[in-house]
Amino acid sequence: MTNRVGDPLTQAHTVLKNYFGYESFRPLQQEVITNVLKQQDSMVLMPTGGGKSMCFQVPAIVMEGTCIVISPLIALMEDQVEGLKRNGVAAACLHRGVGFQEQKIIEDQARSGQLHLLYVSPEKLLSQQFFDFLKHVKINLFAIDEAHCISFWGHDFRPEYSKLYVLKHVFPEVPIIALTATADKLTRRDILHQLRIKEAKTFISSFDRPNIFLQVVPAENRKKQLLSFLSKRPNQAGIIYCLSRKSTEDLAYKLRKEGIIARPYHAEIPHAERQKTQADFLRDKIQVVVATIAFGMGIDKSNVRWVVHYNLPKNIESYYQEIGRGGRDGLNAHALLFYTYADVIRQQQMLLNLPEDRRQLQEAKLDRLKHFTEAHICRRKVLLNYFGEELQQNCGQCDVCKTPPKTVDGTVTAQKILSAVYRCQQMASAQDIVDILRGNNNTTIQQQGWHQLKTFGIGQEIPFAHWHSYVHQLMNMGYLDIAYEANFQLRLTPKSEQVLFQQEKVALQHRVAQKVQESSPKPA
Ligand code: ADP
Ligand code: ZN
């Protein structure tokens, strides 16, 4: 092919067209590719389906040599390699499932420069034997897919990813591109730190999926609520996420009894059967898949019209990833989440066996999700804020926007909280701040000398639960941040300065959401 004519960017366009059959780059792809072609390190944040792969596949072909792609999931790796081969791109993958003979052939191809891309699992990559072999390959790029797996702060930490720092030591001249669909601000920083990348250009494409309507309802009688939801969506394909394998089977059975073509999907169902379910769903032979989180990794069905969370997911990253399977075609889709406090407790229980520090982190993340479900402001604002993006206007496409709750002028309340955070030199957790405002003189407060602050006890008349709610509301609106890495201390943001020093008005929801019990009515 004539892909090495013209300047690198022209070559990239040629490759995009000749190999992949696309006319133009998507937003950000061209910027990322330009950076990679300049041999610079890059960090790419794009939602699932945004087109991350092209960001390393195209440069891998344009540049001389082989791109080594590190990917955690064998199935995804094989899918990608198959796809590439179909497009005439020389690609292969190595993981523990590949036999000795085949591995030798692939290694020979790589050594003699015949491969554009070589996918490897992190375990494979980090074995001594493989590392020695890599030294004989002309490597043009390391692409680290699902890069959030490297960070302890991410939602899917994989220990074998944490040794990837050796790449920069051993191959300092080879550029690295780290890609992920879900990483909050802290995780992002940590990824670069873990990879020993000093200066990476970070590319963040908007996480907004404006065509997905966001709704959270307290679960009262979930099955009835679900059937009513489905009755308005005859024949529309959708996914229901449940927490347990058993409940996926129970629910699928109940739906079938109501005449809805539904099938369960979870990790214990035999492989062949799972594949059939996927295939039937893709071909619209099944309307509903009732699944645990095992479903959806890499599945590319464009016309999923709704996603229901029958149970609470474990954090905002998972929630976002799962609802992102809806509306891939750009047409409207609906995300419905059933919220019960019982589910919060179930999620907490699932964390009990984790090592202490990871448990705390996951609990804090669960807490953020809980705040999202209790949000009194545009849910999309909360969601995007979590990923470090600011939405200027209310979205109009969420339940809060459709029926806004009443708010009061909470400027003074907000100022009290923010100035307490400020006076504690941002070393206090949410709990500490509430204790300070309430004048609760406990050991921590004594030790830190916070009882001497001017803000100590200025909010005694307001109950704990209300203060907590106000703190969470401020967090949801981006006036406060949590430093997960530093004992969950509250941090001020540029936005909080406007309230503290420029008298910016803050509207707060006055009625505090009660803990939603199974049967309680929807909080306003
Ligand atoms: P991600 O890895 O971000 O989830 P993919 O790289 O799998 O996304 O891309 C999602 C889909 O978009 C794929 O079907 C891919 O072929 C397609 N795609 C990527 N880039 C382009 C482009 N520039 N023009 C048209 N389609 C594209
Ligand atoms: Zn909204």
Image (cartoon, rainbow, N blue to C red):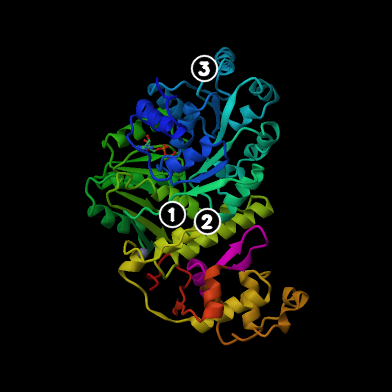
Dots 3, 1 in contact, CB < 8 A: no
The residue located at (37%, 66%) in the rendering is 393
Q: Measuring from the top left, give residue 369's x and y in whole percent.
A: 49, 60
The relative height of residue 407 versus residue 32 in the rendered view (above or below) is below
Q: CA distance from mark 1 to mark 2?
A: 10 Å
> Residue 43: which quarter of the image?
top right
Mark 1 residue type: Asn
Which residue extends farthest front? Answer: 6
The relative height of residue 281 versus residue 412 in the rendered view (above or below) is above
Q: Is mark 1 within 8 Å of ligand 2?
A: no
Q: CA distance from mark 2 to mark 3?
A: 51 Å
* Near-viewer residue (514 or 147): 147
The residue located at (61%, 76%) in the rendering is 434
Q: Measuring from the top left, give residue 495's x and y in whole percent.
A: 52, 70
Q: In the displayed structure, does residue 435 sit left or right of residue 210?
A: right
Q: In the displayed structure, does residue 31 sit left or right of residue 404?
A: right
Q: CA distance from mark 3 to mark 1?
A: 48 Å
Q: Find disc 2 in the rendering and name its residue.
A: 346
> Please, what secondary structure does the residue beneath circle 1 have?
loop
Q: Quadrant of the N terminus?
A: top left
Residues in magenta? 470-492
Residue 311 marker: 1
> Residue 169: which quarter of the image?
top right
> Please, what secondary structure does the residue beneath circle 2 have?
helix
Mark 3 residue type: Gln
Is 24 included in the stretch rendered in magenta? no
Badge 2 density bin: few <14, some 14–19, many ≥20, Cα 10 Å = some
Q: Measuring from the top left, give residue 364's x and y in whole percent.
A: 58, 60
The earlier-in-sequence mark between 1 and 2 is: 1
Mark 2 residue type: Arg
The residue located at (37%, 63%) in the rendering is 217
